[in-house]
Image (cartoon, grey):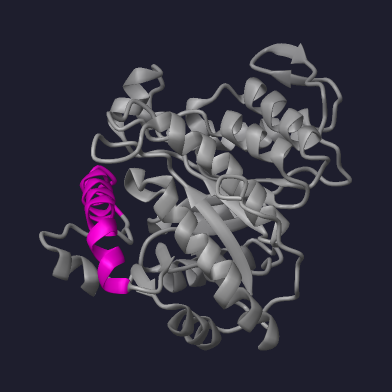
């Protein structure tokens, strides 16, 4: 069973200050690394009033410098808002910072019109732009000269190798499955129709005569929180979870196609009914993990909606002390020597 963290770094007025959230995210990545977590996911958007993470590669660099083994996966990187050559340079540099093999990315075409206007990128050309970016990365990371928009260029440094950082293609619409089959190394669909999208992806790969890569471990729920008192924690969590799901549901309307795991809710009871938000005791979490099985992934978003870091830390530490040892006994995880939380130690 894989373990991961995820951050979008929203810092609404109801939550903790952004400076506290960013510092906590880096410290939590270090803590997770010491426990053997496999991945930390970082999202990207621009121009959001709540400060949604606009510089994921800078945050990722801080996390890579604080860790030794955990992978940093940009999911999703709104690749079409980045200059292809600069993107190749930045990602190669990140790979070197992490010692090689610890940088991954899910590339998306974006869906928020304001972001395209902000960066003066024509939204109607986003698919072609993504195709160009993947082609440029393939050529750039060889370190050799190549033609780019009428000029001969070379990108250095190159990734540490032996292979380049893996490129996943993201999306929530049918077209994303076909696009992923042609581009990149794998597919990372979003929303509630993943199985159907994977089937479309597999069919297109077969049609193209390309191998079907192994699927990423099934992740979920979107928010998992461990506590010895669920009633108490729901009262603390609810404003932040409601803010996140309602804001993401509002943004999802801008997609026009596809689905999202977030829906609009009006009350705490509505929130509790959403399968994507799970608050469990340690005993319940062990059973939850056992039912999900060895090929799945447990993902924590300990700062969701500006959640004060001390609340997120409380859940993570309880998971480490009361859940993780039981998962090891069940054979779902191998043991890793824990390190103290630098905040509470």
Magenta stretch, main secondary structure, is: helix
Task: Judge left or right: residue 250 versus residue 15.
Answer: left
Q: Is residue 203 visible?
A: no
In the rendered image, the vertical position of residue 157 relative to residue 9, given as above or below = above
Residue furthest to the right: 162
The x and y percentages for residue 259 are 31, 59
Task: Judge left or right: residue 259 versus residue 106.
Answer: left
The x and y percentages for residue 61 are 66, 33
Q: Which residues are magenta?
A: 230-257
The x and y percentages for residue 17 are 36, 32
The x and y percentages for residue 157 are 82, 24
Q: In percent of the image, x 71 and y 11: which residue is there?
A: 151
Task: Judge left or right: residue 227 versus residue 198.
Answer: left
Task: Judge left or right: residue 220 versus residue 251.
Answer: right
- Which is more toward the observer, 177 or 81? 81
Asked whether 38 falls inside the magenta stretch, the response is no
- Which is more toward the observer, 92 or 123? 92
Residue furthest to the left: 266
Asked whether 253 falls inside the magenta stretch, the response is yes
Q: In percent of the image, x 40 and y 62: which residue is there?
A: 223
């Amino acid at each position: 069973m894989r373990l991961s963290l995820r951050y979008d770094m929203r810092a609404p007025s109801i939550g903790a200050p952004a400076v506290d959230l960013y510092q906590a995210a880096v410290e939590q990545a270090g803590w997770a690394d010491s426990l053997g977590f496999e991945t930390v996911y970082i999202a990207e958007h621009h121009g959001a009033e709540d400060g949604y993470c606009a510089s994921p590669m800078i945050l990722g660099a801080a996390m890579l410098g604080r860790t030794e083994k955990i992978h940093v996966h940009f999911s999703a990187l709104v690749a079409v808002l980045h200059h292809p050559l600069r993107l190749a340079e930045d990602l190669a540099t990140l790979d070197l910072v992490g010692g090689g093999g610890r940088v991954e990315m899910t590339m998306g075409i974006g869906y928020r019109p304001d972001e395209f206007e902000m960066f003066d990128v024509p939204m109607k050309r986003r698919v072609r732009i993504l195709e160009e970016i993947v082609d440029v990365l393939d050529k750039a990371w060889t370190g050799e000269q190549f033609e780019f928009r009428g000029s001969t260029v070379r990108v250095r440094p190159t990734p540490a190798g032996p292979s380049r950082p893996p490129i996943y293609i993201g999306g929530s619409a049918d077209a994303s499955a076909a696009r992923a089959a042609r581009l990149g190394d794998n597919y990372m669909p979003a929303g509630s129709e993943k199985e159907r999208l994977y089937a479309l992806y597999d069919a297109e790969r077969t049609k193209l005569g390309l191998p079907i890569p192994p699927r990423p471990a099934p992740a979920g729920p979107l928010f998992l929180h461990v506590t010895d008192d669920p009633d108490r924690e729901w009262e603390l969590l609810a404003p932040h979870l409601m803010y996140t799901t309602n804001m993401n549901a509002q943004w999802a309307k801008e997609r026009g196609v596809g689905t999202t795991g977030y829906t609009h809710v009006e009350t705490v009871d509505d929130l509790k009914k959403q399968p994507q938000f799970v608050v469990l005791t340690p005993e319940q979490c062990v059973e939850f993990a056992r039912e999900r099985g060895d090929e799945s992934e447990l993902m924590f978003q300990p700062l969701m909606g500006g959640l004060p870091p001390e609340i997120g830390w409380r859940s993570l530490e309880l998971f480490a002390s009361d859940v993780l040892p039981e998962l090891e006994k069940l054979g779902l995880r191998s043991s890793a020597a824990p390190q103290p939380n630098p905040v509470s130690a």
